[in-house]
Structures are given as C-alpha cells and as structure tokens.
Amino acid sequence: MKRIIKYLTVVFISAFVLWGCDESFLELSNPNEIDAEVLFTDVDNLELELTSVYSSLKSYRLYGAGFMAQSLLPKGFIADQDWTGNADWNHMFQHESVAEDNSIADIWLGWYRVVARANDFFTQAEDYITENDPTSDDLASIEKMMGEAHFLRAFAYFHLVRLWGEGNPAVDGEKPGVPLILQVSTSIEDMKVGRASVNEVYAQIISDLNNAIALLPESWDADNIARADSWSAKGLLSRVYMTQHDFSNAKTTLEDIINNGGFSLVPGDEYEGLFHDEKEFSEESLFEINLATDMTVNAFNGGLGSLHALLIAPYSKGWSNIFVHDENVRRFGSDPRLHVNALEPGVDTIYNGTFVVKPYPKGELGWSLKKYINLEESIYSTNRNYGANFNIVRLADIYLMYAEVLNEQGNDATASEYMNKVRRRAYGYDPNTAVSEVDYTGFTGTQLRDSIREERFRELFAEGMRWYDIQRWRTGAEEAARYEKVVSGSIVFEDKDYYLPIPQTEMTNNEVIQQSTGY
C-alpha cells in the first residue's frame, strides 16, 4: 500500500453535554467551526495545517485535474485537441488567451491557495511557539514543517512568476511579476496587492528555498517519504537558477545533488514505471506530488488521485480530450522514448491486452498520450481518479540541466557525457558506460546546446516542463512555426504569449493590480 501523508480532515464538533454552562456559551458565532485558538494548541494539529498545503497541490484547479492538460501541455506544444468545445482551452492551444478565460482564473486561484495556506501555517506555527512552551522535540518538528511550508510556497511562486511574469529574469527582471503576499490577509484591503517585479519574486523564491534547505532533513523515514526534503529544495533551486541564467550558482547546486545526493537513474527496464504508479519515490526522485487511487468519483469531489488520466485517456477510454501532436511523433523519430510517452494506434494494447488503442480521428497520426495514464484498467470502470504520482524533480532532469550549464561554460566533453547518460538509460544500457551506437559524440557549442535541448524534449515530454524550457530559452516563435496549428486553429505566437493575462476577476476585485502588457 502506498505511504501517504495524512489527508486533511475537516472536523465538526458539537457540544451535547454542558457542565456548568452559562450564557457565554451562546456567544459562539458558529458551533460547527473550530476556533484557531483551540485547534492550534497541539503539534499534531499543526501537522494537519501543513497537510492542507500539500493537499492544495492536488486540487481540481492544479494537479488534481486540468492544470497539466489544459495549460502546460498546450502551451508547450505537446498535444493537439480532440475536444474544442471550450473557448478557454482553444485559446491556450493557440496561444491566444484572454483575461476573461476561466481556466486562467482557476490556475491563478489554485496557486494562490497554496500560498495562502502556507502563510497561514507560518502564522499558526509562530503563534504556537510564542504562546506555548514547546519541548525541544516539538520545536524540531515544527522547524521541519516550516521548511516544508517554505518549499511549497516557493514552488507556488515559481509557477506563478513563470506563468504571469512579463520579464525574462536573465534580461529584464524589473518588469511586472505577480503580487507577493507573505502574510495572512485580515481584511479585503490587505488582499489588494499590486505586482512585484520579476526580480523581487525570484528573490523571495530563493529565500524560501534556502530556508527550506536549512530546515529540512536530507531524507525522511518510510512513513513520511512523500514529504519534501532538503534535496527537493536544492533540485527546485537549481531550476530557479537555470531560469535566471545564473549558471554559476546552478552548477554549484547541481554538483551538490549529483555528488552528494545518492541518487541514480532507474534501470531502463523500470523506466516506464516512473509514470504509472509502479516506481514511486525511486532512487531517481527528488520530489513528486503524491497521489493514490481511491473510490472518489473525481477530483471535484476531493479524493487522493487526479483526473489528469481521464482528460488525456486513449480515444474512447475516458474523456479523451487531447492527444499527441502529430509533429511530436515525427520529432521523436526512432527514439525509444516515443513509446514511453505515447501509444501507437492499432499496435499498442492496454488493460492487459484486452483493448487495442484506437487512433484519435482528428489527427493525421492520432497517437495517444501515455505518461500518467492508467494502463491496467479503465478509468471509467472503477473511478475517475488515478494515483500515479507526478514527477516534479528527478535525476534525469538534473543531469540535463548540468549538461546545459557545462555547455554554457565551454566544458563540452563533460556536458556530452551527462547528456549521454540519460540517452543510454533510455536505450536500456548502463548510463555510465559509453555506447557508440547511442552516444552523441563530437558535438560542441551551439550544436551541442541544441542536442541537449532536444534531449530534454524527449526525456521530459508531457511532464509539464516543456513550456517553461521554451520560455526560458525564448524559442516560442520558432516552436510555434514548427507546429503551425492545432485542431481549433492556427498557432499565432507573439512576445506577449510568454506570459498570461491577469484574470479579469482579479482585475475587477483588485483595483491596484496592473493588467499584463498587450492584453
């Protein structure tokens, strides 16, 4: 059975036996609501508060449903559409989003919910320390939890600033980012916050991650394996540095992970299991969002899994809203990861060989997405949630970022070796032994840079990273020209498409916020 962080439970308390009560009892504003002064007098209850921060990652606005399929995969040119009945979704695929799109508001609210819950945890934890006399063991537990909250808030702001920040932090970081809210709002006016600069948001992310590194352990025991640890924070920090083009700090952090973290690539014959509820919390994993298959109908009703598998299911075996863009099938060529990432219609079977994958009729090739879908049973026959964890940081990504850094710094030989480690595993070989028929050799400079970028495309396909890579490399127009169109229309890419419009609901409710340039 999967080890899962305790799921947040909302507790309702009713008082039936009143000993020596007086009229003051009637002053309760809501007898079904627990007062924070009562709830947060125990470390275990702080644990529940922290769990609510983790659980907000798998809300239906984020990884519990449409965040990947409705935003990151379309923006990253990963998928094409079978369903075109939602204008918001069409806009995302065509890079023509507008402020009125509800899907954009959902993402905004989803990530700011993570921020709000993290802020609330900090408040309650600090109050607990001030108002109680925690033991040294309790204080150590609280400090670890605060490290986790720092990590989760940084994770949320890293998504927010990359989705809405107008400036490339390596070039024009003084442009508008997103509102920085670091305390619990106590009034409507407190919630009306303008946009901090991109640089200010990144400074806060780095501060949070450094605090997380200082407070978190290097590992947890088996019962707490889903928690973020200091390596999780270092992995995310390395990606932050890469986005800033701070290659010096990225190199230092990446080398720490590679040399001291004790991680290794899973063997080639276990590779697919990373994406199908089989190889979770592996030797390759630095952080993943923990999910589980349960009998909850779907993420809109809670539950421990995600609707993502339902949205991207093979044709006729789910909602089947999106499929692999035909150009990506061609782009993979003969690379074996095509069959890790996609299902070939008329050839591949699922559900123990009982169903031959059908072609998506709106595509010329019509391949289905494969990562993070349920290969063993119908997503309809049992429930609509699936429990495969989402990989957020894993060692293959670390190796490829390290290769990118070394190439930037002119160390092309070692850069090639780390790129080739990932390739060898994909082809079923020992990552640490040269394989002439697999290795890319003799590449230098721009040619090696482009090869590393293509390796990231092949290795991390459909894991939610492609759009952010395109964004930091500023290759959006080039990629759009390659893919040209989706079922709903032509892809039209402009500089403003590197960021999203501020949701209209936020513009209406917050008069001090500035709309994104060009929208």
Image (cartoon, rainbow, N blue to C red):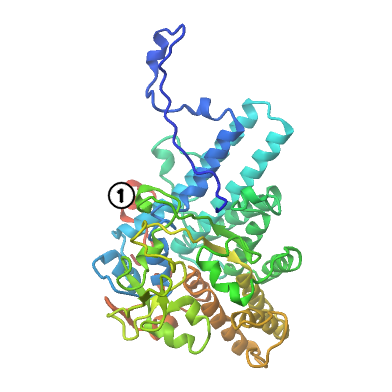
Q: Residue at x 46, y 8 (%)?
A: 19
Extreme residue in the right direction = 260
For label 1, the crowd category at 10 Å Cα-Cα, with few meaning under 14, some 14 to 19 and many 20 or more, is few
Extreme residue in the left direction = 85
Q: Amino acid at mark 1?
A: Thr
Residue 269 x, y percent position in the rendering: 60, 76
Q: Residue at x 28, y 80 (%)?
A: 362
Q: Residue at x 33, y 78 (%)?
A: 358
Q: Nearer the viewer, residue 358 or 197?
A: 358
Disc 1 target residue:
508
Compared to 14, does 318 lie above or below? below
Residue 169 x, y percent position in the rendering: 55, 66
With 264 as the anchor, is 322 left or right in this view? left
Q: Nearer the viewer, residue 246 or 57?
A: 57
Q: Quadrant of residue 286?
A: bottom right
Q: Nearer the viewer, residue 425 or 205?
A: 425
Compared to 364, does 488 lie above or below? above
